[in-house]
Amino acid sequence: MMGVPALLSPAVSLGPVGAPLAFLVVGALAGAVEEPGWRGYGLAALQERLPVLAAALVVGVFWALWHLPLFWLEGTYQAGLGVGTPRFWGFHAAVLVGSPVYAWLYNASGRVVFSVVWFHAVGNVVAEALVDGSDVVLEVGADAVASLVLVVVGWRWMTRRGEAVHHLDTSTDHGEQR
């Protein structure tokens, strides 16, 4: 898959509209490629055996490892953070800490993978297009605002009709007295 670095290289002229559009497309594609596996398959299967938080953290560890090669791929957001730097460790901590947020969104939406695909895409676009990674507070703030807007505006498209999960009670008696 052609990434943002290749699309935005001097050899490729995308024009004033093309560059932002490339960020959006590649950001959305990354979420569309990753999230069916991370949440739709991995998290769903792990939640059958582990508590949600533990399952989300297991997925988070593998999700962080998945991004490691990008730190050596020139032109990527991750390469700009540097290997072994505080921003390198911050990125991995954010992925690990963010995984339970993705798990919550996935479960609260009625396990609609599109909800986390969209969330992932917005996170990628915010991280790569709006901030340069040098100001952690700005990046976290931008991610938080974008996330809030995304959830509020997109909730109806991110949930199955009438199936938003308000808790994760998997018992069959639904709390009824016997």
Image (cartoon, grey):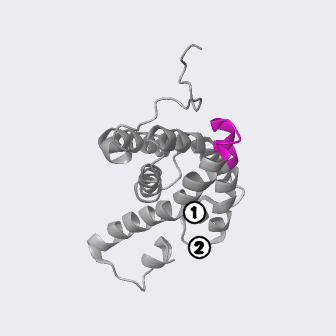
Picture coordinates of residue 126, whole percent (x, y): 42, 53
Q: Amino acid at mark 2?
A: Glu
Query: Above or below — where is 158 with respect to 82?
Result: above
Query: Above or below — where is 58 with respect to 8?
Result: above
Helix, strand or loop under label 2 = loop
- Determine if residue 86 is in view: no
Q: Check disc 2: other Cα within 10 Å, few if <14, some if 14-19, many if 20+.
A: few
Q: Image check: 18 left or right of 129?
A: left
Helix, strand or loop under label 1 = helix
Q: Are marks 2 and 1 in contact (CB under 8 Å)?
A: no
Q: Quadrant of residue 161?
A: top left
Tell me the residue at 54%/17% (across/down): 176
Picture coordinates of residue 131, whole percent (x, y): 44, 53
- Which tag, 2 or 1, sits closer to the chain's start? 2
Picture coordinates of residue 134, whole percent (x, y): 53, 51
Q: Quadrant of residue 171?
A: top right
Instruction: Give the labeled residue for mark 2.
Output: 74
Quarter the C terminus occupies: top right
Tell me the residue at 41%/53% (across/down): 118
Q: Image check: 113 left or right of 21?
A: right
Q: What secondary structure is the magenta-colored segment mainly? A: helix
Callout count:
2
Tell me the residue at 46%/30% (across/down): 166
Query: Above or below — where is 45 with respect to 7?
Result: above
Q: Amino acid at mark 1?
A: Gly
Which residues fall within the magenta stretch? 46-58
Residue 82 falls within the magenta-colored stretch: no
Q: Could you say which is closer to the camera, residue 100 or residue 23?
A: 100
Instruction: Give the labeled residue for mark 1.
Output: 80
Query: Above or below — where is 171 with respect to 112?
Result: above
Question: How far apart are the alpha carbons under marks 2 and 1?
Answer: 8 Å
Residue 50 falls within the magenta-colored stretch: yes
